[in-house]
Image: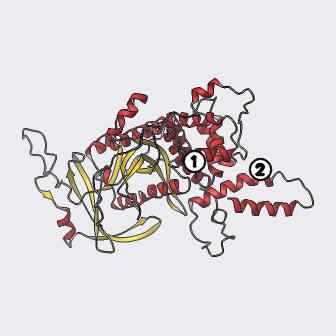
Amino acid sequence: MAKRKRSAKRPQAKHKKQTPSQHHKCQRLKRTNPLRSRTTEAITPLCGYLQTAVAALQSVLDRRIAFRLSIIVAGMLLADDRRTASAWFAAAGVQQDWDRFYECLISVGRSSGSLASAMVGLLVQKFAPGVGDRIQLALDDSPTSRFGRCVEGAGVHHNPTPGPADGEWLYGHNWVLLTWLATHPLWGVIALPLQSLLYVRQADVPKLAVKYAWEFRTKHELGVALLTSFVQSLRARGVRNSVWLAVDGAYAARPFLLPVLKLGVTVVSRLRRDACLFDLPGEAVPHRRGRRRIYGRNKLSLATLADQSQGWESLTYSGRGVEVTRPCKSFLATSELISGRIRVVLLRFDDGNWAPYFCTDPSADVREILEAVAARWAIEECFQGMKEVWGAGQQQVRNVWSSIGCWNLNSWVYGLVELCSWESPQAELSDRRSRPWDNASRRPSHADRRRTIARKMLEKQFIATLPPTPNSPQIRTLLEGLIAIVI
């Protein structure tokens, strides 16, 4: 029997409405339990810089629920296997008031803007950009697969990385994420998440509009909203440094670029090979009526310019922590993307292929443009770490604000773990004595950083409280071995 050809059209969700839950909140409130125990702290509390950073985030939440944020973060660090929200609560030792912690996730989702502003304050305090230093950002979107009925905000989205058993489409959420790109002296560029917004397809908006007055916004509009919030938060703290934004070719569009340029942000992105470009207009003729020309008279072909042998020069720049030397060609052009001049850079790779990039600042240096393009890959590593290490998208919550809160919590904890490990030596982060087959000099992964912090939390709770008995060193050794196996 011949196989049916898979359709390229976007499939539609087929989930039916579920029956009312037996754990409905209104029914629980009618049956109050006077013996209900209240969780006031985690079994294994946070320690060190992470405790201080989470306290700064808690300060923007309502004081009646703010203390629950540190408990949730502690559970996130110690949870294992499938990282659902219930696994967080179990690892943190949440008791009968578990429903209050689900409400805390909703509050985190609704207050994500204020929490992101507090996260910006932590990054500014950590790196303290000097006068003339440039702040580098990256913006991109990524989907998370979901399964189940009545998942609010979920829809059918394009799958950017389909595996052997995956299809071209997936059912779930789609997130637009803004990150701060910081350069570590040893590990290169690291993306530190700031805030994410949920993209909901226009076909799925009416279901949310009835309950939450949700309005449809494109990914470009969500990206502009994220940048506007970041710039306002940055200027409110007195930081006047220039801001560069690295994006992929999907955001090289006029509806996105024009509002971003009004914010004073310089954009670096990939350019289409068939992009409509013109040369520079000539000098204005004195005493001639009419406005000055914006575009030149001659149209430029990137393919023709790339085939020409003249104009190429070798340039050495830093690409993902390694100095690389590649031939490139740069020139000025006018484009309808921003209704003005842009700096175009053609880069030729080792296999003979080439790619065009552009910068909205015509006076930008070619080396800085190529390094910004290479640094953008850090946000892809951030997405991978959030999904594989923290299990972003696996929390199994259906409320849209809970989903937003869980995704942002995963991203912020990812950034806080990187900040906590920023000044830690490599020997502390990549302790592979229990794995002699592994390369001890390999760069520490984000999972290594998470395990180091979780191990410190457990050691502070168990090992530091050991009494000074004759068998204390032996017990300490046994506990260290047990913690190494668990974490």
Provide the residue designation for mark 1.
Answer: 84
Residue closer to the observer: 96 or 250: 96
Q: Residue at x 32, y 75 (%)?
A: 351
Q: Is residue 427 left or right of residue 290?
A: right
Q: Amino acid at mark 1?
A: Thr
Q: Is residue 272 left or right of residue 288?
A: right
Tell me the SS state at disc 2: helix
Q: Look at the image and tell me in which quarter the N terminus lies.
A: bottom left
Residue closer to the observer: 4 or 385: 4
Disc 2 versus disc 1: nearer the observer: 1
Measured as percent of width and height from the top left, residue 432 is found at 66, 69
Residue 461 - label: 2
Residue closer to the observer: 71 or 3: 3
Q: Amino acid at mark 2?
A: Gln
Q: Look at the image and tell me in which quarter the C terminus lies.
A: bottom right
Q: Is residue 459 visible?
A: yes
Q: Eyeballing the image, is 300 above or below 84?
A: below
Q: Residue at x 30, y 45 (%)?
A: 257
User: Within the image, what quadrant is residue 352 found in?
Assistant: bottom left
Residue most toward the left? 288
Q: Residues within 10 Å of mark 2 (few under 14, many from 20)?
A: some
Q: Is residue 136 visible?
A: no
Tell me the SS state at disc 1: loop
Q: Residues within 10 Å of mark 1 (few under 14, many from 20)?
A: many
